[in-house]
Image (cartoon, rainbow, N blue to C red):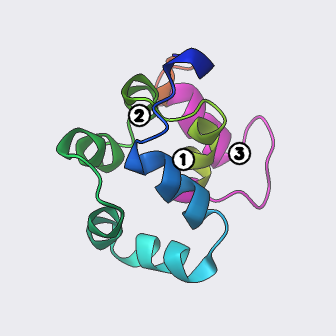
């Protein structure tokens, strides 16, 4: 799961890029993730990974490695980024770096 595995055509890559830059699209994602996934044309596998906050699974599908931590910020916020933030903990848990609930 590295840069060589990126699928540039994967809709999730475009979704992360746009959600991080467009406040209106991000609000829609927060209020109705299913509608956002539909708008971006995510595949069934992508949708399942998003529903489960499966960051490693998104990486395996071809999401760019830079975007993987951004996914955790979409769910947990990114205003106070540090090693013990909710977003950092979610990323570590979902990537198998930290056991869930630790």
Residue 102 visible = no
| Residue that label 1 marks | 71
Q: Secondary structure at mark 3?
A: loop
Q: Is residue 31 magenta?
A: no
Q: Above or below — where is 100 with respect to 33?
A: above
| Residue that label 3 marks | 85
The span shown in magenta is: 74-93
Q: Above or below — where is 57 with respect to 10?
A: above
Badge 1 vs badge 2, beta-carbon distance below 8 Å = yes
Residue located 32% across and 70% down the image: 39
40 relative position to 22: left or right: left
Q: Above or below — where is 32 with respect to 20?
A: below
Q: Secondary structure at mark 1?
A: helix
Q: Position of residue 50 (x, y in %)?
A: 35, 47
Q: Nearer the viewer, residue 54 or 65?
A: 65
**Which label is found at residue 19?**
none
Q: Is residue 81 magenta?
A: yes
> Nearer the observer, disc 1 or disc 3?
1
Q: Position of residue 13 (x, y in %)?
A: 50, 46
Tell me how far mark 2 sits from mark 3, CA to CA: 21 Å
**Which label is found at residue 58?**
2
Q: Secondary structure at mark 2?
A: helix
Residue located 38% across and 35% down the image: 54
Q: Nearer the viewer, residue 41 or 56?
A: 41
Q: Residues within 10 Å of mark 2 (few under 14, many from 20)?
A: many
Q: Nearer the viewer, residue 57 or 39?
A: 39
């Amino acid at each position: 799961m590295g840069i060589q595995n990126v699928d540039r055509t994967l809709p999730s890559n475009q979704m992360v890029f746009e959600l991080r830059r467009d406040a209106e699209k991000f609000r829609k994602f927060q209020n109705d993730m299913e509608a956002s996934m539909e708008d971006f044309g995510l595949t069934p596998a992508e949708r399942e990974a998003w529903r489960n906050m499966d960051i490693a699974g998104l990486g395996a599908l071809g999401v760019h490695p830079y975007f993987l931590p951004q996914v955790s910020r979409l769910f947990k916020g990114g205003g106070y980024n540090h090693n013990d933030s909710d977003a950092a903990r979610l990323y570590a848990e979902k990537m198998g770096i930290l056991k869930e609930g630790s």
